[in-house]
């Protein structure tokens, strides 16, 4: 899976993402790592936006697919210790940026492939954020070394994934008197739109396996292209967009325009700025949200902390009126975006090596 | 034949191993650079980068870490 790995992965995942919409997921949201994490946060009661609560089995599939793949290929390597607290907050603010735009980089490309032109300012913002991150990388920014830890340390995230899957099946209620959630499941809105459990889990496992083998990364793609003139990962993103577009087109899911797009708003400024924040935070953390989940399956404890930061950020985003809705940015979304950008800039400056 | 330059990139996350390798390669026109990494991903990335820069690449597996030997 070396040279053509990302292209094969991108193509298959792009087609599957479009198909997942056909099979029940929300529009242009066949796969959205940020949105799905946000839905999981809601299902667990970490926020109370009733329309976005579901334990997306795709996410558990990512972790388990990667975990199995890493074990079979002898690439399972538990490691941690590279500035975990900073990674937590990078995940936190990456999520806020993504929820101001309404999608992670995966969904930004999927929205483009579905004809949602509001994705264009988002993707331009993403590229801008990544370029700012690259400038810090050139200046010696890094979060320090991770160190190998005992094998058992890497079992936690796969175990969490199994627990999430069990809860999707059993739908337990832990709320007052045991009659209400959490676990919450949306009765209407995007959270109530989902592909059948086995399909979603199957796709998640396949994507986890493919992405682990190929190192598919939607942020590393642009970073490596700009920074190193290396199109290896970028080719995968191109294949992802093309195959999602082609599949959407033949399924009648390609609806070009700005207005009335599913789970999207038309405020170009904050579509752009939200993704500046997300792109910068993902670049400073070393990879897109999908890649972070995949690395948790390989045993990377720092990625797991990043992911938990994303989960927490999703809770805050909805509890504190930061997340956007189809009517536009949340009341405090723009302010939180600026705070997030300032945080990332501070981290970028402070975490530089003094070069000889 | 001078001693190889050793770059210890173990534990560094993406894209640091490449940046450290790039820094080492930029200091010498020819010779040998040994890059130590602990993940297969970093091994692949460093090897691909060096090949693209016109260096010959040899790999040594040391169990839980890898040595990527670059020569020109």
Image (spheres, coloured by chain):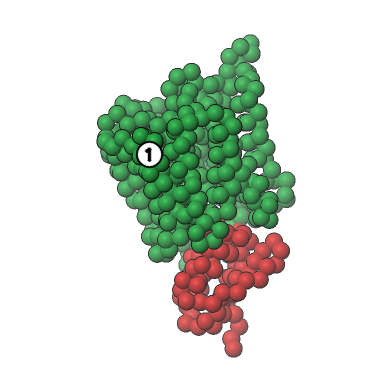
The structure residue drawn at horizontal position 54% and vertical position 49%, both measured from the top left corner, is A211
| Residue A138, x across and y down, in percent | 42, 62
| Residue A284, x across and y down, in percent | 46, 51
Instruction: Look at mark 1 in the image and give the residue it sits on.
Output: A250
The structure residue drawn at horizontal position 31% and vertical position 35%, both measured from the top left corner, is A255
| Residue A17, x across and y down, in percent | 46, 39
The answer to whether residue A196 of the structure is visible from this angle is yes
Give me the chain that's red. Answer: B
Residue at the farthest front position? A250
Q: Residues within 10 Å of mark 1 (few under 14, many from 20)?
A: few
- In the displayed structure, A68 sits above or below A131; it is above
Q: Is residue B32 left or right of residue A250?
A: right
The structure residue drawn at horizontal position 53% and vertical position 21%, both measured from the top left corner, is A185
- Of A178 and A171, the residue lying toward us: A171
Element marked by disc 1: helix
| Residue A309, x across and y down, in percent | 53, 39
Quadrant in the picture for the N terminus of chain A: bottom right
Give me the chain that's green. Answer: A
The answer to whether residue A89 of the structure is visible from this angle is no
Q: Chain of mark 1?
A: A
């Amino acid at each position: 899976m070396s040279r053509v790995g990302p292209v094969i992965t991108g193509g298959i995942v792009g087609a599957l993402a479009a198909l997942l919409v056909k099979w029940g997921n929300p529009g242009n949201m066949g796969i959205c790592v940020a949105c799905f994490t946000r839905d999981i946060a809601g299902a667990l009661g970490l926020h109370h936006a009733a329309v976005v609560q579901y334990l997306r089995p795709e996410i558990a599939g990512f972790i388990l697919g990667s975990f199995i793949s890493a074990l079979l290929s002898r690439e399972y390597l538990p490691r941690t210790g590279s500035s975990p607290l900073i990674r937590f907050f990078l995940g936190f603010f990456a999520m806020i940026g993504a929820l101001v735009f309404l999608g992670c980089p995966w969904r930004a490309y999927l929205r483009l492939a579905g004809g949602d032109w509001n994705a264009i300012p988002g993707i331009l913002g993403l590229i801008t954020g990544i370029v700012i991150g690259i400038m810090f990388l050139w200046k010696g920014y890094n979060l320090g070394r991770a160190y190998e830890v005992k094998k058992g340390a890497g079992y936690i995230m796969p175990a969490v994934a199994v627990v999430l899957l069990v809860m999707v099946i059993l739908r337990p209620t832990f709320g007052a008197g045991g009659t209400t959630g959490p676990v919450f499941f949306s009765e209407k809105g995007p959270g109530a739109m989902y592909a059948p459990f086995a399909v979603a889990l199957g796709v998640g496992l396949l994507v986890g396996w493919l992405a682990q083998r190929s190192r598919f990364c939607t942020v590393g793609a642009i970073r490596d292209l700009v920074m190193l003139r290396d199109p290896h990962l970028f080719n995968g993103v191109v294949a992802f967009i093309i195959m999602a577009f082609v599949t959407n087109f033949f399924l009648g899911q390609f609806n070009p325009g700005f207005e009335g797009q599913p789970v999207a708003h038309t405020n170009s400024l904050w579509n752009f700025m939200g993704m500046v924040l997300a792109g910068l935070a993902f670049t400073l953390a070393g990879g897109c949200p999908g890649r972070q989940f995949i690395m948790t399956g390989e045993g990377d404890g720092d990625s797991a902390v990043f992911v938990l930061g994303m989960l927490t950020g999703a809770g805050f985003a909805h509890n504190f009126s930061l997340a956007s809705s189809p009517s536009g940015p949340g009341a405090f979304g723009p302010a939180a975006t600026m705070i997030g950008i300032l945080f990332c800039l501070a981290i970028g400056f402070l975490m530089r090596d003094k070069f000889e | 034949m001078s001693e190889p330059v050793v770059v210890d990139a173990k534990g560094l996350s993406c894209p640091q191993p490449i940046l450290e390798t790039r820094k080492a390669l930029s200091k010498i026109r020819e010779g040998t650079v040994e890059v130590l990494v602990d993940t297969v991903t970093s091994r692949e990335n460093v090897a691909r980068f060096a090949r693209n820069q016109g260096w010959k690449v040899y790999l040594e597996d040391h169990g839980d870490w890898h040595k990527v030997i670059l020569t020109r």
